[in-house]
Image: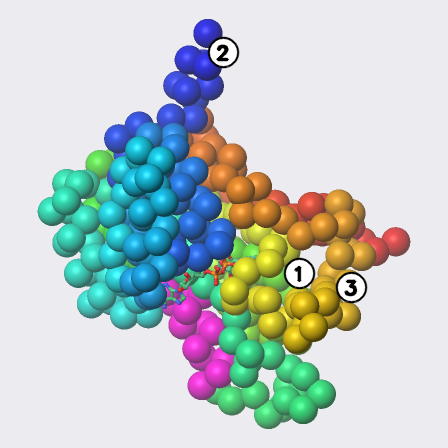
Amino acid sequence: MVNTFLENMFSLKDKVVVVTGGGGCLAGAMAGGAARAGARVAVLDIDSDKALKAASSILKEGNCAIALKADVQDRGSLEEAREAIISYYGRIDCLINGAGGGRSNAITSETLTFFDLTAEAIQSVFDLNILGTIMACQVFGREIIKQERGSILNIASVAGLRPLTRVISYSAAKAAVVNFTAWLAVHMCQNYSKGIRVNCIAPGFCLAEQNRFLLIDAKNEKTERAKKILASVPQNRFGEPEEFVSAVLWLLSDSSSFTTGSVIAIDGGFDAYSGV
Ligand SMILES: NC(=O)c1ccc[n+]([C@@H]2O[C@H](COP(=O)([O-])OP(=O)(O)OC[C@H]3O[C@@H](n4cnc5c(N)ncnc54)[C@H](O)[C@@H]3O)[C@@H](O)[C@H]2O)c1
């Protein structure tokens, strides 16, 4: 009885879920979770080996996935992926915009001051995080609107809610992801269908490839920055990729049918803590 209740509430049975950056830590776990909830998943990544690895682990669990190489900064590459998904699955219901991250040359340090950051370095972080999210919403959203129902989930960051020191471009780009989420949620309701929802999660700190260099030093010890971060997280630890899956199932499934334009912080309390 309980199982049926929960299954009905959070089921993604037969929904086609596209996951950009799906070979990565967070989005890979999200893709796996969506597949366990019954979704047919398309794992997209700029790194085809990573996409294949993530899709294979979904298939090994007896669930449904395909892997596609796709670059969110290249509209043509996203359109090719969309055509492949449509010819394989026939439709698209949900999109998780998981591709994103920082760049070491866009972060201030003792040797690279704010005044010296190049426009190219700043632009590359904007392109990956905000333009890549917008373009994927354009390309896959065009299919989602055909169903008049669907869910788009953007991945911002706590850095988009309150800027973090040093990561200027990343903080600004993620703030733009939060802003764009609200914009697209309204736009979809007003222009296409009230059944198309757009939400955003703002993850706190997890160890992943794109931020490891900031958090772990050459001796495999926590950096001063990592220690400072953990002191600002009331739960006093990094998050694990699997800890985002329940929110993903909620936001992609019909259980969140009255939730659109929302930003959900999942951060061990980081955003709630004033430091005092
Ligand atoms: N790890 C964290 O602490 C944390 C915190 C807040 C937000 N986030 C966000 O979560 C998302 C996932 O990050 P993660 O930490 O799992 O990082 P990750 O580096 O493990 O995964 C990112 C994935 O995106 C892929 N990718 C990079 N550029 C791409 C492109 N142009 N097109 C398609 N794919 C591309 C990478 O190959 C990689 O597989 C990102 O948007 C990140 O900013 C992460």
Distance from mark 3 CB to nearest ligand 1 atom below 8 Å: no
With respect to residue 74, does 14 lie above or below?
Answer: above
- Residue occupying the far top of the picture: 1
Query: For the residues marked 3 and 2, what is the alpha-carbon distance in whole angstroms?
Result: 42 Å
Q: Is residue 31 magenta?
A: no
Q: Which residue is mark 1?
A: 162
Query: Residues in magenta?
Result: 120-135
Q: Is residue 122 magenta?
A: yes
**59 or 274, nearer to the observer:** 59
Count the labels in the image. 3
Q: Amino acid at mark 1?
A: Arg
Whichever of callouts 3 and 2 sits on the residue coming sooner in the sequence is 2
Residue at 52% in and 70% down: 102
Camera-side mark, 1 or 2: 2
Q: Amino acid at mark 2?
A: Val
Residue at 47% in and 33% down: 250
Q: Does residue 109 appear in this view?
A: yes
With respect to residue 39, does 166 lie above or below?
Answer: below
Query: For the residues marked 1 and 2, what is the alpha-carbon distance in whole angstroms?
Result: 39 Å
Q: Which residue is mark 2?
A: 2
> Left or right of 272: which side holds 44?
left
**125 or 41, nearer to the observer:** 41
**Mark 2 crowdedness (10 Å alpha carbons): few <14, some 14-19, many ≥20:** few
Q: Which residue is mark 3?
A: 228
Measured from the top left, where is residue 254 in percent x and y?
39, 28
Q: Name the colouring of the figure.
A: rainbow
